[in-house]
Structures are given as structure tokens and as C-alpha cells.
Image: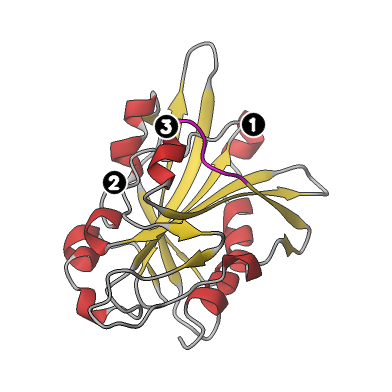
Amino acid sequence: MKYALPSAVAVVLLIGGRVFEDRWSEKSGSVKVRLDNIGRNLEGWEAHDHELEGQQASWAQLSGYLNREYVHTATGRRLAVLLVWGRPDPVSQHTPDQCYPSAGFAPVSEMTRESIDADTPRAAAEFFTRDYAKTGPDPSRLRIYWAWNADGRWQAPDDPHDALGRHRQYYTYGGGVLFKLYIIREVTGEEEAHDTETCKEFMRLLLPEFRKQLFPES
């Protein structure tokens, strides 16, 4: 299975191993996020990390990211998880409707906003979702969920650049680091096309893991 990960993600961050250091704080302190602690086995979902390759690898030299595939051992279902982070202005932009058409994918469903109650009693996470498809000799249909996080809440604002990219002083991380998360599933056959629960059930397992590692005080 091939996932066309969003290639226009623009983040200005260098990473060493799995540790992120905030280089933009106006103060001398740094912030560290240890991504190896994010669950690799989530109730039957097993994870495999991947490096971004080719041209994406050149972007990764200036990026912070977690690129991971989860496979459900009982059903064989697969989900790609791409977490990126960096300065709010670029990370708040470059949404799938901008990135995927350039890779040959066209939207085949309406873009909707969904609430995922993943970490009660905390507020529900909000994600945009939309299906994109590519025709031709190697056709593919992808269901994509995406959202941003500045302070422990996954948000899907109408104008993320205005809502998140310009207000660094409200961010939990020093220097104003913004996170963006993509959950991507390749949809094959009519049964999967009508399956709206697999991604959401998985997100209910994954999102609390991200909160514990990225925003433990929230």
C-alpha cells in the first residue's frame, strides 16, 4: 500500500534522533518531546516507523516529523500517521486541498469537520476529513483526517493561519511551536468506502498517547 504523504509540509526544524529542541524560543530554554514513548502497540495495532524518502527526505532535513504506519494484526487494516511540527506560520498552512491535487489526487467527497471524543473528560478533538482519489494505471483513494494542536487541543478552524499561525504567545511550547497531524487510510472496495468508524476508533487510541507525550500538563 502506498500513501502519498503531503509533500508541501513546510516546517523549519532540525531533529536529532527522536528528540525535538525548540530553537525559536525568545528565552534560552529548550523544549523536548520524546516520540519513542508514543505507543507502538495500541490494542492490536502495531507500528512501523518510516523515513521520508527522495525529495521528501530533503525537506525532512529542515523538519520535525513522525512518519509511522500502524497495521491491525487481526484484520490487516493499515493507517498512516504523519505528525509534523515547527513554526506556526508555515505549519498552519499547506492543507491537503493544496497538496494532494499537485500529486494527482482530486477530492471525491465534501470536506467535513468531525468531533472525536478521545480523552474524556477533556474536550473532544476536532478534525477535518475528506476523501481524495487518483485515477489512471495506479488508482488510489485516500481518506484523510487532519488537525492542528498548539495547547493540547486538536483543532480544525476554518482559517488555521488566522486562528493559529499568528498567536504564538498563547502556545504551550516556548517560541510558539505548532503541531499538525494527518491520519491517512487507503480505501479499497465499497465496504471500506462506507466504513467511517475504523479511523475514528484508532484515533481514540492514538490521541491520548500524543497528549501524554506532547502536552502532559493539559
Q: Quadrant of residue 107?
A: top left
Please give left or right for residue 164 compared with residue 197 in the image: left
Q: Which of marks 3 and 1 is nearer the N terminus?
A: 1
Q: Closer to the camera, 52 or 42?
A: 52
Q: Which sits earlier in the primary sequence, circle 2 or circle 3?
A: 3
Give the image location of residue 30, x and y in percent.
38, 78
Which of the marked residues, 1 or 2, is nearer the chain's N terminus?
1
On screen, residue 37 above or below 16? below
Q: Nearer the viewer, residue 194 or 87?
A: 87
Question: What is the secondary structure assignment of the residue under circle 1?
Answer: loop
Q: Which mark is on residue 1?
A: 1
Residue 3 image position (x, y, % from top left): 54, 35
Residue 94, label in figure = 2
Looking at the rendered image, the quarter that the N terminus falls into is top right
Q: Is mark 2 on a helix, strand or loop?
A: loop
**Residue 125 appearing in the image:** yes
- Image coordinates of residue 198 in percent, x first then y, are 63, 52
Residue at 24%, 60% in the rendered image? 160
Q: Which of marks 3 and 1 is in front?
A: 3
Query: As shown in the figure, which amino acid type bears the numbered disc 1?
Result: Met
Quote the CA–CA distance across marks 2 and 3: 17 Å
**Quick check: 144 above or below 168?**
above
Q: Is residue 159 visible?
A: no
- Vertical comparison of 212 with 6: above or below: below
Q: Which of marks 2 and 3 is in front?
A: 3
Q: Which colour scheme is used?
A: secondary structure
Taking the spot 58% from the left edge, 35% from the top edge, the residue there is 187
Which residue has dot 3 on it?
55
Mark 2: amino acid: His
Q: Give the range drawn in magenta.
A: 50-55
Q: Does the magenta stretch include residue 51?
A: yes
